Image (cartoon, coloured by chain):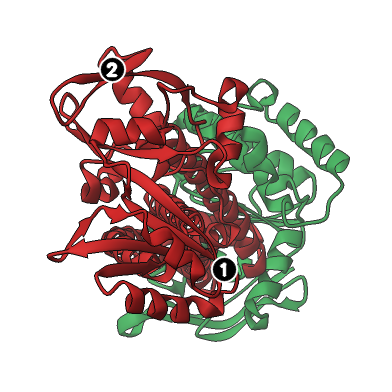
């Protein structure tokens, strides 16, 4: 499903964020990328999502060489296949809950009825129906996190990528997120989570934990 | 945009007024000069002027300036004949029976306003040259669309003008000539000069140059204001075009991360910029129209009124020039859109990861 082959990512001043990384994630697998801050796990997620390109090596997602795709095609591929859950939520703060959830669908030619059906289903699933028209800025952290997950699922992607998803949540909300994650795994989604939150490392439904240290797989 | 539109509206109104004034002027005006100054002209000259080939009519005019000390303004008093074609239409429209009798006057809106403010609602007592008073009744007021020139005017019968200004019966202020063929004007002028060397002959073109000089001086001031407004606008545009704020960049990064292509982002930015700039354009236009034509451009108005402090109040005539509106539109809306699109394109072309970092 996801394959990274001999990936190097070099930033300014010849700083190696990733050094010769190769890894493989199978369909339906839930994989954790574990490292300290600045270890390179977020960079791997960016490469998988096609948000940035490797300095060398190749990234294949669903057999598509995403690292070689032109920018617009990578965006299109991401829209159709990947749901992204960000560490800092990255919601558009002046928009309502509903409008934030449908952001990934706006450039698509989806039927209005279909969009509304999907939104209604997700609002119900994440207990946000009553907050539908609320401006997201006014929501609590837990509610914002649920909006982020709903937004990641609106395109019904087969791959979910989460970057430090519990970094801004308290313990109870973190446990709620873990429950959502298990639901998504049960639905057959392929999930890659970058985290250093100990909460995740003893979960029975996690398939694999990949440790990274200073850009190198351990 | 508001300031820009207001300046253009005012300049346009003055230009419109200038044209209107020029169109109403006679083709040739003959005045007598004595010691280099304008003096009363003898009516005996009428016959000889009429004899000149190409002259259709020669009409004496009786006019002068009356200083109204209470308000510190000059009124222009013009003696008219109700049978005079130039005035008969106005008189018939505004006066009952088409006449103001022997002791009536028709005044411009500016004059009416000043008289009202000084409690002269039905009549006014003019002080004659011998110090005695002459009561003249207010028979009517020009309509609201009165012009810059006629706004401070008072029309009354010729006899009253002669009485108030103590004009001799055999003299007039000047004589206007109507001509059949405009091409003949230089020949007629030469002939008048030949017959009456002490005369000054003023053509419509001379008046046009004179008015144009005043207008050019005024428009120079407007040009300075216009440049300041444009400069300010472009400073804002430059600020917008030179880079997006952190939040705007982050928003573009989020959209890219969520699968928006560059063209999707630019399309969204285009709609956003168009709605903002078009709404601003319409709002500025309505505000400028209200400021100039409803409020009569307070502050800005003083700039172009400066040359005629002795003139009474007047209304800026309402006139819309669609070419001018197009200039304001093309100076604002497309430029603002470009100032949004270009930096957005630069940011959207970067890696989303880089933008969000």
- Side of B304 relative to A81 (left or right): left
Dot 1: chain letter: A
Is residue B81 visible in the rendered structure shown here? yes
Subunit that carries the residue with mark 2: B
Pick whichever, B224 or B147, lies toward us.
Answer: B147
Between A116 and A168, the one nearer to me in the picture:
A116
Can you give x and y, in whole percent of width and height, for residue B120 in the image? 30, 14
Residue B226, image x, y percentages: 33, 60
In space, the residues marked 2 and 1 are separated at their CA atoms by 75 Å
User: Label 2: few (<14), some or many (≥20) within 10 Å?
Assistant: few
Q: Secondary structure at mark 1?
A: loop
Corner quadrant of residue B216: bottom left
Judging depth in this view, the residue of A82 and A73 nearest the camera is: A73
Chain corresponding to green in the figure? A
Q: Which chain is red?
A: B
Please state which of the two labelled residues, at mark 2 or mark 1, is closer to the viewer. 2
Residue occupying image coordinates x 26% and y 60%: B221
- Residue at 72% x, 46% y is A153
Residue B223 drawn above or below residue A120:
below
Residue B257 can be seen in this image: no
Residue A51: mark in rendering = 1
Mark 2 sits on what residue?
B117
Q: Are marks 2 and 1 in contact (CB under 8 Å)?
A: no
Label 1, residues with CA under 10 Å away: few <14, some 14-19, many ≥20: many
């Amino acid at each position: 499903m996801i394959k990274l082959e001999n990936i190097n990512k070099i930033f300014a001043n010849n700083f190696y964020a990733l050094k010769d990384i190769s890894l493989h994630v199978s369909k339906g697998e839930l994989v954790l990328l574990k490292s300290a801050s600045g270890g390179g796990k977020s960079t791997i997620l960016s490469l998988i999502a096609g948000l940035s390109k490797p300095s060398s090596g190749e990234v294949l997602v669903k057999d598509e060489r995403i690292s070689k795709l032109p920018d617009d095609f990578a965006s299109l591929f991401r829209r159709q296949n990947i749901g992204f859950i960000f560490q800092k939520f990255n919601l558009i703060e002046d928009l309502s809950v509903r409008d934030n959830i449908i952001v990934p669908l706006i450039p698509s030619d989806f039927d209005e009825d279909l969009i509304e059906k999907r939104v209604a289903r997700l609002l119900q699933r994440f207990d946000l129906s009553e907050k539908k028209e609320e401006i997201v800025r006014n929501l609590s952290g837990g509610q914002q996190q649920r909006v982020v997950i709903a937004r990641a699922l609106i395109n019904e992607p087969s791959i979910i990528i989460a970057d430090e998803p519990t970094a801004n949540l308290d313990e109870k909300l973190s446990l709620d997120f873990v429950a959502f994650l298990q639901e998504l795994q049960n639905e057959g989604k392929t999930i890659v989570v970058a985290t250093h939150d100990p909460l995740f490392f003893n979960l029975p439904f996690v398939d694999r934990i990949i440790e990274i240290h200073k850009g190198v797989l351990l | 945009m508001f300031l820009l539109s207001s300046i253009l509206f005012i300049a346009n109104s003055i230009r419109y007024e200038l044209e209107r004034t020029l169109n109403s002027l006679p083709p040739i005006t003959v005045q007598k000069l004595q010691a280099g100054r304008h003096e009363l002209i003898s009516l005996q000259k009428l016959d000889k002027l009429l004899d000149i080939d190409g002259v259709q009519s020669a009409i004496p005019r009786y006019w002068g300036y009356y200083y109204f000390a209470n308000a510190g303004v000059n009124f222009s008093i013009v003696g008219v004949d109700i049978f005079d074609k130039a005035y008969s239409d106005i008189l018939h429209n505004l006066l009952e029976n088409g006449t103001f009798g022997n002791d009536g006057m028709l005044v411009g809106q500016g004059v009416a306003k000043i008289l009202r403010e000084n409690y002269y609602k039905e009549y006014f007592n003019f002080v004659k040259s011998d110090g005695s008073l002459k009561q003249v009744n207010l028979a009517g007021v020009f309509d609201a669309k009165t012009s810059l020139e006629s706004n401070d005017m008072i029309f009354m019968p010729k006899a009253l003008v002669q009485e108030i200004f103590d004009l001799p019966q055999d003299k007039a202020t000047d004589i206007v000539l109507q001509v059949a063929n405009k091409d003949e004007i230089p020949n007629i002028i030469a002939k008048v000069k030949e017959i009456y060397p002490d005369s000054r002959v003023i053509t419509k073109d001379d008046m046009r140059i004179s008015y144009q000089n005043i207008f050019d001086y005024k428009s120079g001031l407007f040009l300075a204001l216009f440049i300041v407004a444009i400069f300010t606008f472009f400073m804002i545009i430059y600020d917008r075009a030179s880079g997006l704020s952190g939040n705007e960049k982050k928003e573009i990064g989020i959209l890219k991360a969520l699968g928006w292509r560059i063209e999707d982002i630019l399309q969204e930015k285009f709609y956003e910029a168009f709605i903002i700039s078009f709404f601003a354009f319409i709002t500025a236009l309505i505000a400028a129209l209200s400021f100039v034509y409803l409020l009569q451009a307070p502050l800005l108005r003083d700039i172009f009124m400066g040359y005629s402090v002795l003139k009474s109040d007047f209304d800026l005539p309402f006139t819309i020039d669609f070419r001018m509106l197009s200039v304001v539109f093309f100076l604002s809306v497309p430029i603002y859109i470009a100032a949004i699109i270009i930096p957005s394109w630069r940011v959207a072309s970067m890696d989303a990861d880089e933008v969000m970092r």
